[in-house]
Image (spheres, helix red, strand yellow):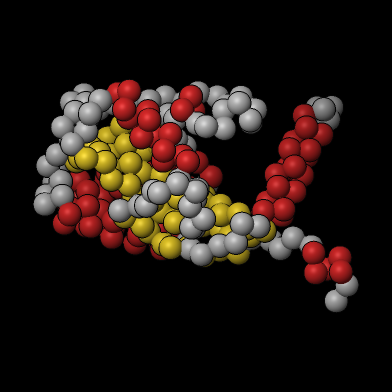
Amino acid sequence: MTAHQESAPRPPHQVLDGTDIARVITRIAHEIVERAKGAEDVVLLGIHTRGVHLARRLHARLAQITDQDIPLGTLDITMYRDDLRLKPARALEHTEMPPGGIDGRLVVLVDDVLFSGRTIRAALDALNDIGRPRAVQLAVLVDRGHRELPIRADYVGKNLPTSLREAVQVRLSDRDGVDAVLVGDRDFAARSSQALAAQAATESHLPE
């Protein structure tokens, strides 16, 4: 095997499919009901972007389990990120609180991947400007480790040990057309994204 072959980035492999993700959401919904003793004061807040889609699915599953319409909202953390000055400007998303607000409620934040913990820290800062919940819990589809802040998830779909050179990709049918969780080399993901961007740019300049 040549040195080039050894260093070549590996394509992603699938670790969860649509059936797995549906099963995970069902399990987390049951865990929330058990820990909250019925979920009467639970509010779900999905963190943009894929956390919002997961929160909607969790909301639907909780409705089936409890026969209740659990309040559901969305949270944009863009302006609370600690890397705001280090990365290109991001488009602002929409923060939407349920009609009853979050004061005195048990807020369950929903996100796709828990990594360094900085996204959740930003979400907590955003919540602090919105209201004062009784408690805040965190539900994630994947916990990949490598925490940089003392933050942990209360509900985890899958603990997925990874190296820092790997990238975790969550794909949801609501946004991506398919349900899957993929793990692959970060370099491969970056090169694939660059190739797709270059292809799109080329196609946009082709004569019709």
Residue at figure coordinates x 25%, y 53% from the top left: 29
x and y percentages locating residue 132 in the rendered image = 22, 29
Q: How many marks?
A: 0
- What residue occupies the far bottom of the structure in this picture? 1
Residue at figure coordinates x 48%, y 63% from the top left: 160
Quadrant for the N terminus, please: bottom right
20 on left or right of 148: left
x and y percentages locating residue 47 in the rendered image = 40, 37
Residue 112 visible in the shown view: no
123 on left or right of 144: left
181 on left or right of 38: right
Q: Nearer the viewer, residue 143 or 55?
A: 143
x and y percentages locating residue 85 in the rendered image = 61, 26
Residue 169 visible in the shown view: yes
Residue at figure coordinates x 71%, y 54% from the top left: 188
Q: Is residue 134 above or below residue 20?
A: above
Snapshot quadrant of residue 23: bottom left
Quadrant for the C terminus, please: top right
20 on left or right of 178: left
x and y percentages locating residue 15 in the rendered image = 52, 65
